[in-house]
Image (spheres, rainbow, N blue to C red):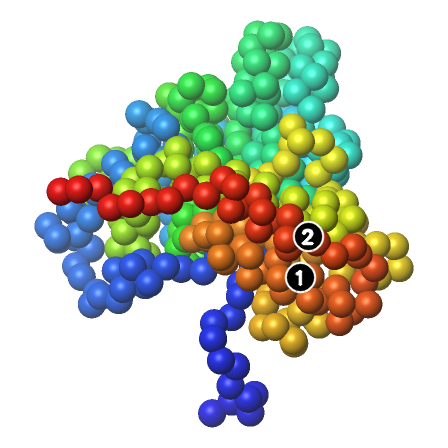
Amino acid sequence: MSNEPRRAGRHFLQIPGPTPVPERILAAMSRQMLDHRGLEFQQLGRRVLSGIKGLFKTQGHVIIYPSSGTGAWEAALTNTLSPGDKVLMCETGQFAVLWAGMATRLGLIPEVIPTDWRIGADANLIEQRLRADTGRKIKAVCVVHNETSTGCRTRLDEVRKAIDAVKHPALLMADTISSLACTDLRHDEWGIDVTVSGSQKGMMLPPGLSFTAISAKAIDASKSAELRRSYFAWDDMLAMNASGFFPYTPATGLLYGLAEAIDMINEEGLENVFERHERLSEATRRAVEGWGLDIQSRDAKYHSPAVTAVIMPEGHSADGFRKIVLDSFNMSLGTGLNKIAGKVFRIGHLGDTNELTIMGALAGVEMGFDLAGVPHTKGGVGAAMSYLAETARPKSAVAA
Ligand SMILES: *Cc1c(COP(=O)(O)O)cnc(C)c1O
């Protein structure tokens, strides 16, 4: 038994992932193990491998690894590139920093475009760098779609246009770990070659699965790519997936959950899921504006529908504030990372979140400001409530 006193009600997990897992998914995963070489598994394998494609808007292959998103990052690089290859990356925040660090460790040469951590990747600068690369030494352009550390979203369609404008042959790789099932993503239409994602954010699942959508061009590249890979090699995976199976023991429990998550997203409607995220993020931004505070994303063009990073007033520690909110109201807010550590806190509004979840979170923040003596104006919560009430979408059951 824990020495901690019991806290009534549920913990508010408002970090940008892992996100709370809906009861339906928890129930779907609560099953006995099964033979992963048997017919029953094959049906499950086929169901998730085909169902996940719709979320990426791809007709191509989506690989599902038993790994966190970081594993899919590694798979993306090692399956398509060779030692010494140059990769163009944009330092939009902490996740971009980590992906570039991985590229270096793997023996690649990242050419990093320094970027203001208050915006997304700049397609014009990508175009300039590619234009200057007359020797075509850059083999891949890697961008983070939704930079979870800053709450800035990059326009992947603009990045595609930038590559096409120069007719550069580099592969386009996108990290959509915190944007899948939160905001529009068109793997095929935007000509993305490798799109990596994960289970524990917009997908509403526990951590432990990653997803990798790959284009025909990426598969071609994998045939001559010389970086070492074994567990994460695409070829064995694709060969086995063709019949619904996996080359090694898959995370069967999580796959039951994945099948349920895909059903839930389709029942709501993927575009409705995006709209819900936009609406809840707008409510959050109105609250911050109502408090007289600023958010990390400096331009509406980049505002994230999944997470909002709130800048603390000068002289006030974001982490001290987070601790007060946790101790007083049983809510976890996201911490600031890297150079904005202590300066921002993050409110996750992705995954299985609705109006009252976000209102509860915003009320906890506003009360926390009072307790922590953080200067702010009253009315943030009220502004968010007004917006949500004005834009309410009553749902009535469809008559049978
Ligand atoms: C969470 C996250 C990661 C890291 O994923 P893990 O599942 O923790 O390995 C990478 N990129 C982005 C954008 C993320 O949000």
The quadrant in which the C terminus is found is top left
**Label 2: element kind:** helix
Res. 400 visible in picture: yes
Residue 24, picture quadrant: bottom left
Question: Looking at the picture, does residue 8 appear above or below residue 395?
Answer: below
Q: x and y percent of residue 158 in the render?
A: 59, 19
Q: x and y percent of residue 300 in the render?
A: 67, 31
Q: x and y percent of residue 247 in the render?
A: 28, 47
Res. 74 visible in picture: no
| Residues at circles 2 and 1 in contact by the CB criterion of under 8 Å | yes
The residue at the point 22 percent across, 66 percent down is 31
> Disc 2 marks which amino acid?
Gly
Q: x and y percent of residue 178 in the render?
A: 52, 44
Q: Residues within 10 Å of mark 2 (few under 14, many from 20)?
A: many
Q: What residue would you read off at disc 1?
A: 365
Q: What residue would you read off at disc 2?
A: 380
